[in-house]
Each structure stands twice: as structure tokens, then as C-alpha cells.
Amino acid sequence: MKKVTTLLPIIIAIFILNSTNGYTQYSSKKVKSKHEKYTDSLKQVEYNYKFPIWGQKVYEKGFDIPYPAGIMANYMWMEQGVDITNMQLGLKTDNLDIPLTSVDFIQFGDNSNTSYTFNVRPDLWIFPFLNVYGIFGYGHTSTEVNLVAPIQLQSVVEQNISTAGFGVMGAGGIGPVWFSVDANFTWNKPELLDEATRVNVVGIRLGKTFTFKNKPESNIAIWAGGMSINMQTETRGQIQLSEAIPGFEDKTDQIVTDYNDWHDANYDDLTFIQKKVVDDVLDPIVGRIDAADGSAIIRYGMDKQVAQKWNGLIGMQYQYNKRWMLRSEAGLIGDRKSFLLSLNYRFLM
């Protein structure tokens, strides 16, 4: 039993490296290809590096491993639906200071978020089957909120965003097919929010790697899978009226008219608490809109979550050699659409 336990990590590593790098077992031939000669030569390599742990054992089995350390530059674009609940509003002017107050009768239509980010991802293979990495980036996000009642209003909030986090990836495979499970945790700080928002991403991929027989260090990998996004629901921030409502001065009259129509038609049917919210919060806000006071500060709070957590992925990577890789991935199936382009440089340590 002890022998089996000792060999298990090596067996796992062989399965993984066999799949993720495209080096499948081969039968002996009188004349060997460059790929077979390259694979045979790995058994003679002295792996004198700290990472990945058990790297020497894997080489002795004739399987290649990627250089353990790397840094990846990524560009990512994403568009997805957003659900908003538990809306809260407040107001701050020279003469008023209204704290965040729950407004449970506000109704929303379809809301969406579009963002792009540039980030770097340093990583290290601790074991041949376990990779850890960090994420550091900067980008831009645009959130479109469609209000249905008490007024019909489309608001687009654009802001820059900084990102920092970490992740871990496990990989495995049997024969020519490999799989990976990737989870990362990032804290994203939009400039208009009071605190950073935590986002958890889980990716599952199943793929196959095709190695060039006459150029063993090069290969092409293709895969399909899925990605899940779960975000911290609570959001708090503040913004000027002129920034929250595009074309603010041109829309003031229509907003005030719509609000008065809603007020006349619905006020008597509201509960006592809802009427107090209208009197103490919504009326002062609409009063600032009526006065075209674009400098008034709207405080807002909400629970925000992606409309659909899972979406489908397809991707491809070209490995020029053991140092340089180019990767592209797209989210095509589901509410979320995304595009990723990455350049990866790897080195020994």
C-alpha cells in the first residue's frame, strides 16, 4: 500500500503531462521521428530545478513538462446581464443630507454590464498537476440600468476599475484528452464605489493537444468548457446626477413629468412606510432634477448579481516553443459573451 501511495502523484503527473502537452505514448519503430527522439532524450535530463516538485520523476518517465514559472499578459472583453435587487437611495446637497434608504417599490427592466480589462498573471507550477497564480489589472466598466417605475429612465454609469487577486488550477487527463479546473478570487475596485467588489470565477475545460512531430516543442491545443461567475452582491457608492443621467439637462422635464404622473396614480395605494420614502427621499431627488442641479450627489446601494452564472467556452492555444504561447478564448453560449487574448512567457526556476 505504501508503494502505491508513493507512486500515485507520479502516475497523476504522467496522465496530466501526457494530456496537457500532447506527448502521447508511442510504439517502437526502426526509424524514430524527431518527436520520439525528443521524448527519449527527456529520460536522460537532470532536472535540477526547484519547481515543479517531482519534475525529475516525470522526466524519467519520458514526459515533457512546461517551464514552471511564467507571466501572462491578458486582454479580456465581457458583456453580461445584471440583476438588481434591494435598491437604496440617498441624497447629498448643500442643504440636504439624506442617508441610504430602502426603496422596495422601484422596478427594473433588463440591465447589463460591459467591461474590458488588461491584466498580468504571474504563475508557478508547484506540482506538475497544480498551478497557482496572481492577477493584477486595470480596466473600464460600463453599466446600463433601465428603470421602469416610478419613472422610465436609462442610466449608463462608466468608470475605471482596478483588479487584484489570486487563483489555483488543477489539471488531469487520460490518454490524449485533458481537463482542467480553475478557480480565482479577485477584488475589483470601481472608482465610484466605496469598497472593492469580490468576484469568484470557476472554469472547467476539456481539450486535446496536437503536437508537431517534427517540432516537438510546438503544439496546438483546443478545448471547450464552461465558466461560472459569482459576485459579491452588496454595492455601495455615490455619483453626481449629471453623471448618472446621460443628457441630464435635456431630460429633466420629462423625468419630472413621468414622476408626477406615477405619483398621482400610485401614491394612495402605497403603504405608510412607502409613502414616507416617497416624501423623504424620492421627492427631494426629483426636486433636484427639476432644478437641473446636476451637482447634487445621489447615494445608492443595491444587491447586484450576474443574471446567468454559467456560460459556455471554446478556446485554442498555439505553443511556439516552451517559452512562448499565444492563447484565445471566447464565451459564446449563454447570456454572457466574452473574448480573451493572452500572451504567455515561461522560464525555469
Image (cartoon, rainbow, N blue to C red):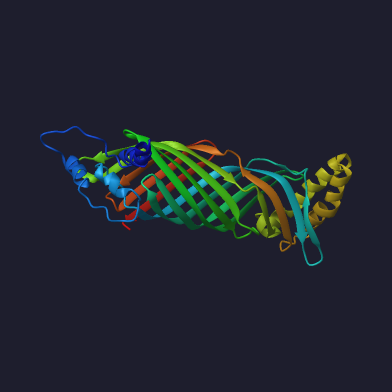
Q: Position of residue 238 (x, y in %)?
A: 69, 58
Return the residue found at the far left.
30
Return the residue found at the far bottom.
94
Count the labels in the image.
Answer: 0
In the rendered image, the quadrant that contains the N terminus is top left
Say if residue 214 shows up in the picture. Answer: no
| Closer to us: 300 or 209 | 209
User: In the picture shown, does residue 134 fall above or below 223?
Assistant: below
| Closer to us: 44 or 89 | 44
Asked whether, in this view, residue 221 is left or right of residue 106, the answer is left
Asked whether, in this view, residue 78 is left or right of residue 82, the answer is left
When asked about the image quadrant of residue 288, the answer is bottom right
Residue at coordinates 20% horizontally, 48% vertically from top-left? 44
Residue at coordinates 60% horizontally, 50% vertically from top-left? 143
In the rendered image, the quadrant that contains the C terminus is bottom left
| Closer to us: 263 or 313 | 313
Q: Position of residue 303 (x, y in %)?
A: 68, 47
Say if residue 132 shows up in the picture. Answer: yes
Q: Position of residue 295 (x, y in %)?
A: 71, 64
Residue at coordinates 65% horizontally, 54% vertically from top-left? 246
Q: Position of residue 68 (x, y in %)?
A: 34, 53
| Closer to us: 22 or 95 | 22
Return the residue found at the far front.
2
